[in-house]
Image (cartoon, rainbow, N blue to C red):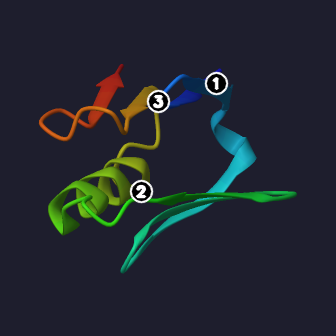
Amino acid sequence: MSTVSIKKGLVNMKMDRNAIVNIEDTSDGIIFNFKDCYFYVIDMSMPLQVKRLIKTSFDGFTEGNIEIDLNNYMKPVKVVL
C-alpha cells in the first residue's frame, strides 16, 4: 500500500495514495484534490518550481510512498520506493 504524507506547520496528514485524485498548482499556493474534499495551501512565497516538483513527483512516481514537506522548500518532496 502506497501512502502520501503532507506536512505543513504542525499539521501532518498521512493517507492512502488512492485518496488523492490530483494536485494543482495555483498562483497563490497548491491544491490537493481528494475524492471527497480538497486541501488548499495558501502560501504566496512558495516558488513555482516547488509547486511543479510536487505535482510532477506525484504524477510521475506511481509506486512508492511520497512525503511532501511544505515547511522545507529546499527539499519539498521525498519518494521512498
Closer to the chain start, of discs 3 and 2, is: 3
Which residue lies under the disc numbered 3? 9
Circle 3 packing at 10 Å, graded few (<14), some (14-19), many (20+), is: few
User: Which residue carries the number 2 mark?
Assistant: 59
Name the spot of residue 7 as percent of width and height, x first: 48, 29
Q: How far apart are marks 1 and 3 (CA)?
A: 14 Å
Q: Is mark 2 on a helix, strand or loop?
A: helix
Between circles 1 and 2, the one closer to the viewer is: 1
Q: Residues within 10 Å of mark 2 (few under 14, many from 20)?
A: few
Which numbered tag is attached to residue 57?
none
For the residues labelled 3 and 2, the Cα–Cα distance comes to: 24 Å
Relative to the observer, which residue lies in front, 80 or 54?
A: 54
Amino acid type of the residue tagged 1 in the rendering: Lys
SS assignment at label 1:
strand
Q: Which of 27 and 21 is in front in this view?
A: 27
Please tell me which residue lies in front, 47 or 10.
10
Q: Residue at x 58, y 62 (%)?
A: 22
| Location of residue 3 with respect to 62 vertically, above or below | above
Q: Of callouts 1 and 3, which one flags the residue occurring earlier in the amino acid sequence? A: 3
Q: Which amino acid does label 3 sit on?
A: Gly
The numbered mark, 1 or 2, whose residue comes first in the sequence reads 1
Residue at 46% x, 43% y is 62
Residue at x-position 58% and y-position 23%: 12
Disc 2 marks a residue whose amino acid type is Asp
Q: Is residue 23 above or below residue 68?
A: below
Q: Which of marks 3 and 2 is in front?
A: 3
**Which residue position holds label 1?**
14
